[in-house]
């Protein structure tokens, strides 16, 4: 457990440590330099987090963000910690391109000056959204990890109507890979629409066989119906998949047997190409065990978890 000194108070940085005991989700750092998302994904939890106003983009003054990062990194140096800051927990990291470009220009020199800390960029962006990364000098690129949220084409067409299409996201991930960035993939939420097995097989073939992606990690998740998300979501059609679902410490999930079916099938499909770290997002320990996946460490830290948000 990391304990920040009382004098280290931040407005744009927080340490996430509120995971319910029955959920595997390690503690991680959040960087909230921008809040809100312009995309229109039906299931988005930000609808609840921001009380239905997820499209209202709020930016923190970058000079204050840099000041807070500098203070955090000085403390981390004293504690001999290497920090990964997730900038995509309350926003799409890259969606507001002009703001993202300014963020990179201001924060990259600071990251380079310390040399050991990194920022995780989580996005559904395409070529336009990741262009600032391609323009960034090579000396800064090792301080950013790009994590692309990708879904099966029919799922994206039905429930992810705002962001670039799936193939554009895969192309953007490939460009990042070719330009020296570590790439991670999130298949989340996997939704068992009609013909889902074929759709996810095709997606995985696209990523690995056609585009030759080599992600360092893949994180899988299914729908998570938090109470506030359900209350504030505009499109409630996705809630049909949560009928007779399991109530967990992280909201209402699909029935356990359906999650097992979904995870098992997609994991088998991925293993045809990828034998590196693969994890589940905010899932119960019971599901991990039923899939013959060793729960990564012990609650509440889950120190051995190799999922999206941690180093």
Image: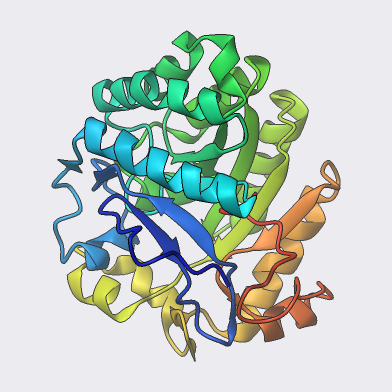
Q: Nearer the viewer, residue 138 or 232?
A: 138
The spot of residue 55 in percent (x, y) is 17, 47
Lateral position of residue 194 relative to residue 225, left or right:
right
Lateral position of residue 197 relative to residue 9, left or right:
right
> Would you place residue 257 above or below residue 272 in this image?
below
- Residue 205, located in which quarter of the rendered image? top right
Could one spot residue 92 in this view of the protein? no
> Would you place residue 237 above or below residue 58 in this image?
below
Number of disc labels: 0
- Residue 307, located in which quarter of the rendered image? bottom right
Q: Quadrant of the N terminus?
A: bottom right
Please tell me which residue is depicted at 19% across the width and 39% down the height of the picture: 59
Q: Nearer the viewer, residue 22 or 69?
A: 69
Specify how the rendered protein is coloured.
Answer: rainbow
The spot of residue 74 in percent (x, y) is 48, 43
Could one spot residue 275 in this view of the protein? yes
Please tell me which residue is depicted at 72% across the width and 80% down the height of the picture: 298
> Would you place residue 61 above or below residue 40 in this image?
above
The spot of residue 189 in percent (x, y) is 50, 59
Please tell me which residue is depicted at 20% across the width and 62% down the height of the picture: 50
> Would you place residue 122 above or below residue 296 in this image?
above
- Residue 127, located in which quarter of the rendered image? top left
The spot of residue 140 in percent (x, y) is 54, 19
Please tell me which residue is depicted at 50% across the width and 29% down the height of the picture: 111
Lateral position of residue 27 relative to residue 257, left or right:
left
């Amino acid at each position: 457990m990391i304990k920040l000194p009382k004098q280290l108070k931040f407005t744009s940085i927080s340490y996430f440590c509120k995971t319910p005991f029955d959920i595997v989700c390690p503690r991680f750092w959040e960087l909230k330099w921008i809040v809100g998302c312009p995309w229109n994904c039906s299931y988005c939890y930000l609808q609840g987090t921001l009380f239905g106003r997820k499209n209202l983009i709020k930016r923190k003054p970058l000079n204050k963000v840099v000041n807070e990062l500098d203070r955090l990194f000085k403390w981390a140096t004293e504690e001999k910690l290497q920090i990964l800051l997730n900038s995509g927990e309350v926003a799409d990291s890259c969606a507001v391109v002009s703001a993202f470009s300014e963020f990179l220009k201001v924060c990259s020199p600071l990251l380079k000056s310390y040399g050991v800390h990194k920022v995780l960029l989580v996005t559904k962006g395409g070529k336009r959204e990741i262009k600032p990364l391609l323009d960034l000098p090579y000396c800064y690129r090792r301080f950013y990890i790009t994590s692309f949220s990708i879904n099966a084409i029919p799922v994206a067409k039905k429930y992810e109507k705002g962001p670039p299409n799936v193939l554009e996201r895969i192309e953007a991930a490939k460009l990042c890979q070719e330009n020296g960035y570590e790439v991670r993939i999130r298949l989340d939420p996997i939704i068992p629409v009609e013909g889902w097995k074929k759709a996810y097989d095709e997606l995985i073939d696209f990523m690995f066989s056609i585009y030759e992606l080599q992600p360092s990690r893949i994180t899988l998740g299914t729908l998570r119906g938090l109470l506030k998300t359900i209350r504030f979501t505009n499109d409630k059609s996705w809630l049909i998949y949560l009928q007779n679902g399991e109530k967990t410490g992280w909201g209402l999930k699909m029935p356990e047997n359906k999650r097992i079916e979904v995870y098992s099938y997609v994991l088998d499909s991925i293993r045809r190409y990828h034998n590196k770290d693969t994890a589940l997002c905010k899932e119960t320990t019971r599901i991990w065990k039923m899939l013959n996946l060793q729960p990564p460490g012990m609650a509440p830290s889950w120190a051995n978890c190799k999922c999206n948000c941690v180093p």
